[in-house]
Amino acid sequence: LDTVDAVADSEFENVKGRDKRELARVNSLLKHATTLNSHEIERKINHEVLKQWLVEFLDILSGAVTHGDLHIQYERLTVSLADESLRNIAHRSAANLYLDATIDVTDLEMRLNNPVHTLKQAGELVMPPIFQVHNLGRLGLQRREEKIAKVQAIIAHLTELDPTTRVIDFKKFAKSQDGFWFRDSRGSNDFKSAKTFAIVGTPCANIAMLRADYVAMTGLHPTDKDPAFAAFVDRHILATVTQCFGRKAGDRFNQGDIIYFLSDFDLGNIPHTLIKSGDITAEAMSNLELLQLKVAQVINTVADGGFDLLNASQRQLSDYFGIPRGVLLYHFDWIKPLLDNLYNKLIHSFNEKLNSLNEPSDLELVNLWVGVTELFLSDNLPIKDTLVGIFEFFAEHIPLYLHSHILASLSNHARHKLFSTLAVLAISE
């Protein structure tokens, strides 16, 4: 109320002399014409501003109005009240027909305060197969860098396979060519030509607004972890997701279309298949899945050569790799700590606090053997030759107290190769 209209300061920068004086005169007249005196401000407060919300505000505080909610967010007070007009129309009519493809009957009954009978749609709504990637969590507005990278890897892989791939995500994460939740996820035909449709995240509307809606309809004020309110929120999310799936349903569906839904939200009765991110691309595997894959590849390689690593005894391992059993048992003393160290780094991203190396000769040794080990493990050698090299490096040339320093400086590729190779010896333990 105390703001006034005026000429922008930037307008004065481009004028001089008489024009600047004339602009100043206009600015003064504009301010004078749009400035309210104290009596006018008081009148507007009493007759216009307070009239809009103060009575309801006091009624909600006193309990005179039960179907009302107050909340402060972003420095604004919001007063929410039940809109009785829809209920009045429904109650006074002989019958009402509501056409809504996604609203839950429970919520419509809550909004109308009347029982609702569902009429089943004739025929079946055609929809593409839905694959739900359920191991990345909710993927809401707060995401760790690791999750962001996996989502990007999945989208990049799907786009490489199918250039028509389109994406729905929150505006915060979406690219310029993508659609946004709540804007493009309903009432849009922009994705009709996409054969692959990637839908990312759990679209939960503002909780405070959902709570206000819930209170206005029910007169119940939910507490923390209130199961009825939580169910109300979940139904709202499911309705939003279902609307988004509808971008490829019905007459928008084409044979060969597919939907990927990246979220662990429960889809209820919607037909879908649960998959993991690593099922789409190895780039989106968890650390454990990637390590398991590397070990399995080594085991399969050996199996292709006719040797069963999984059921081999220590003696059979010794014979297969050409390593005396006594020597193999001796190597286990440093192999086990090395595997533990590698596992912690690859799975838990745990970097142990290492003692500082003060001797220049130790630093030189670490730099030398990191480079040699990286180069050696980058070669695609048979596993027997790789093991011989690893034994020579870590058992004969690299002092035991430098093992951790070497591992800390290796690339993840080299760590995976080292772990998967040594792990075949520990299988029989």
Image (cartoon, rainbow, N blue to C red):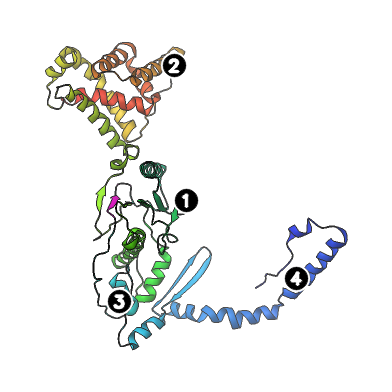
Determine the secondary structure under disc 2.
Answer: helix
Using the rendered image of the protein, determine whether residue 142 is visible from the camera's viewpoint.
yes
In front: mark 3 or mark 1?
1
In reply to whether residue 129 is colored magenta, the answer given is: yes
- Label 1: how many Cα within 10 Å (few below 14, some 14–19, many 20+): few
The residue mark sitting in front, 3 or 2, is 3
Image position, residue 37 (x, y; %): 72, 77
Q: Nearer the viewer, mark 4 or mark 3?
A: 3
Query: Tag 2: residue type?
Result: Leu
**Span colored in magenta:** 128-136
Q: Residue at x 33, y 32 (%)?
A: 346
Q: Secondary structure at mark 4?
A: helix
Q: Position of residue 342 (x, y in %)?
A: 31, 28
Residue at figure coordinates x 21%, y 25% from the top left: 301
Question: Residue 30's image quarter?
Answer: bottom right
Give how far apart the Cα atoms at labels 3 and 1 are.
39 Å
Taking 429 as reference, is 396 above or below it? above
Residue type indicated by callout 1: Gln
Q: Which mark is residue 109?
A: 3
Q: Earlier in the sequence, mark 3 or mark 1?
A: 3
Looking at the rendering, which quadrant does residue 380 occupy?
top left
Q: Are marks 1 and 4 in contact (CB under 8 Å)?
A: no
In contact (CB < 8 Å): disc 3 and disc 1: no
Q: Which residue is mark 2?
A: 363
Tell me the residue that label 1 is attached to.
177
Q: Is residue 324 left or right of residue 368?
A: left
Q: Which residue is mark 4?
A: 31
Type of amino acid under label 3 = Glu
**Distance from Cα at disc 2 to Cα at disc 1:** 49 Å
Cβ–Cβ under 8 Å for marks 2 and 1: no
Q: Mark 2 or 4 closer to N-term? A: 4
Task: State the SS at label 3.
Answer: helix
